[in-house]
Image (cartoon, helix red, strand yellow):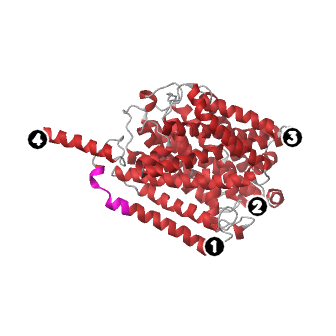
Amino acid sequence: MISFIIAIILLLLGYFIYSKIIERLVKIDPDRVTPAVSMADGVDYVPMKPWRIFLIQFLNIAGVGPICGAIMGAQFGSASFLWIVFGSIFAGAVHDFIAAFISLRHKGCSLPEIHGRYMGHGARDFMRGFTIVLMILVGAVFVNTPAVLLNANFTPDWNIFIWVIIIFAYYLIATLLPIDKLIGRIYPVFGFLLLGMAVAILVALFSHWGSTSQYIPEVWNGLHNDHPDAVHNPIFPMMFISIACGAISGFHATQSPLMARCMVNERQTRPIFYGAMITEGIVALIWAAAATYFFHEPLLAAESAGKGGPAMVGIIANHWFTPVVATITILGVISAAVTSGDTALRSARLIVADFMKIDQKPISKRLLVAVPIFVITAGVLVYSLMDAKGFDLIWRYFAWANQVLATVTLWAISVFLVWKGKHYWFTIIPAIFMTMVTGCFLFVAEKEGLGSLLPRWLGYSIGGLITIAATARFFYWEKHRSPKLIKDGDEEIDYFDKEAMAKKYAEQATKNENLR
C-alpha cells in the first residue's frame, strides 16, 4: 500500500515538474491565434472554456481503458504500478501533449496528417486506413461493453440488441451534431461522475487500510508475475499491452485534434493534454490497487480469479459499496465507455473528411462520411455479439493496434523535434521502448500472435530486431537529412513536398538577392 501512495505522489510530481520541461521544449506561444478562432465553423472548430475542454478530453481518452485495462494489468502484480506511473509521465502524457501541440499548430489536423507531414506521404496514406480501422474497432468495443453491462445489471430480461440500438443511435447523433451542442454539454457531467467514482474507490482503499495494506504487494518486495496463467503470460510484453490507456494509448492522439480545434490559447495545452493523461493515470492506479487487493485477499480471491475488467467492476462495487453507490459506480464505467465510443467515430469522420477534403459544415456532407463508417462498425459489432469469441478477438486486436498507433506517433513526434532542432530524446526513448513492446507482442503472445508457433526466445529476438531496425533507420535519417530543411521555422511547411520546398527556397533566394 505504501507503493501505491508513492505512485500517486510521483504522478502528481510528473505533472508539476516534467510537464513544464516538455512545455519549454515545444515553446508554447500564448499570443498565437488558434484554429478555434481563425477557422471557427460552428461544428468542429468551436471555442470552449478550458475546464470544459479538459473534462471532455479526459472522458474522451479514459473510456474503459484505465479501468478494465488497469484491472487486467493488476493480475501481473505490483509491476503494474511502475508501468502506470512511468508510462504515464514519460510516454503517455508526452505523447498526448506534443501530438496535440502539433495538431494545434497545423490547423487542428487529424493524426494521420501529422504522420504524413513528418514521416512522408506513404506513412500518411497507410496510417489513414490504419487509424480508421482502429476507430471502428473502438466504436464496436465501446458499444458492446456498455450494452453488456446495462443488460446484465439493469435489464436482464431484455434482448441485448435493444441497448445496442439505443447506444448506436446516440453515437450517430453525437457524431453529426456540432461538438458544443451535445458532447460539450453532457461530457463534463460524465467527467465529474468518472472522477467521483475513482475518489469513492480511493476512499474505500484507505478505509480498509488494515487489509489493503496487507494484501497489496509492495514494489520493493519483488516484481513477481502473479497472473493466474503466468506461464503463458509473461510480464513483458503482455502487461504493457493489457494496461494500454492507463499508461499510453494511440487512441488519445486521435482525440487530441478534436480538442485542439476548440482551444483559444496555446497556454491551455499542458493542463488539458498532459494533465488529462496524468489524471487518467491516477484513475488507472486506483483501480489497479483495488483489483490487486481483490486478487490477493483470501476470501475474495476465489471469486475474483480469472475475471475480466467489467466483471471485476461489479465485484469491487458490490463488495465495497451500498447498492446505490455500487449502481453509480457501474454507471460511471458505462458512461466512460459510451463517451469514448462516440468520439472515436467522430474522429473517424473527421479523418475521412480531412483526406477527402469534404466540407463538414453542411449536415448532408457529414452524413455522407458518417453513414459508411457506421455501417462497417455495425457489421463488426454484430460479429462481436453473435460469436462467443468475437469480442475477445476484437479487444485483443484493438489493444495491440492501439499501442502500434502510439508507437508510430512517438516516432513522428521525434521527427518533428528533429526538424525543430529540439532535444528529441524525450520522445525517442519511449518510441524505442514501445517498438520493442509491440514488436515482441506479435511474436510472443500465444493467443493473439505467433507465440504458440515460435519459441519464446525467437519471438523476443524478432521483436528486438524490429526495434533495432527502426532505431537504426531513424538515426541514419537524422544524420543524413538535408541540413537546409531545418533552417525555416515556418510551422506550416511540408518537408516531404519537394515542389513546395523548391518554391519556398526560391522565394527565400529572391529575398536574399534583393537584400544584397
Q: Which mark is residue 456?
A: 1
Q: Amino acid at mark 2?
A: His
- Residue holding disc 2: 296
As measured in the structure, the alpha-carbon distance from the residue carrying label 2 to the one carrying label 4 is 77 Å
- Residue holding disc 3: 156
The furthest residue to the left: 516
Residue 81 in view: yes
Q: Position of residue 407 (x, y in %)?
A: 52, 55
Tell me which numbered mark, 4 or 1, is placed earlier along the sequence: 1
Q: Which mark is residue 516?
A: 4
**Predominant secondary structure in magenta?**
helix
Q: Which residues are magenta?
A: 476-485
**Image quadrant where one finds the N terminus:** bottom right
Q: Position of residue 119 (x, y in %)?
A: 43, 52
Q: Position of residue 2 (x, y in %)?
A: 64, 58
As measured in the structure, the alpha-carbon distance from the residue carrying label 4 to the one carrying label 1 is 66 Å
Instruction: Depth check: give the residue in front, 21 or 428.
Output: 428
As measured in the structure, the alpha-carbon distance from the residue carrying label 3 to the one carrying label 2 is 31 Å
Tell me which numbered mark, 3 or 2, is placed earlier along the sequence: 3
Tell me which numbered mark, 3 or 4, is placed earlier along the sequence: 3
Q: Which mark is residue 436?
A: none
Q: Identify which residue is drawn at 49% across, 25% down.
A: 41
Tell me which numbered mark, 1 or 3, is placed earlier along the sequence: 3
Crowding at dot 4, Cα within 10 Å, few <14 / some 14-19 / many 20+, comes out as few
Q: Is residue 364 magenta?
A: no
SS for callout 2: helix
Horizontal side of 93 relative to 78 (left or right) equals: left
As measured in the structure, the alpha-carbon distance from the residue carrying label 1 to the one carrying label 3 is 43 Å
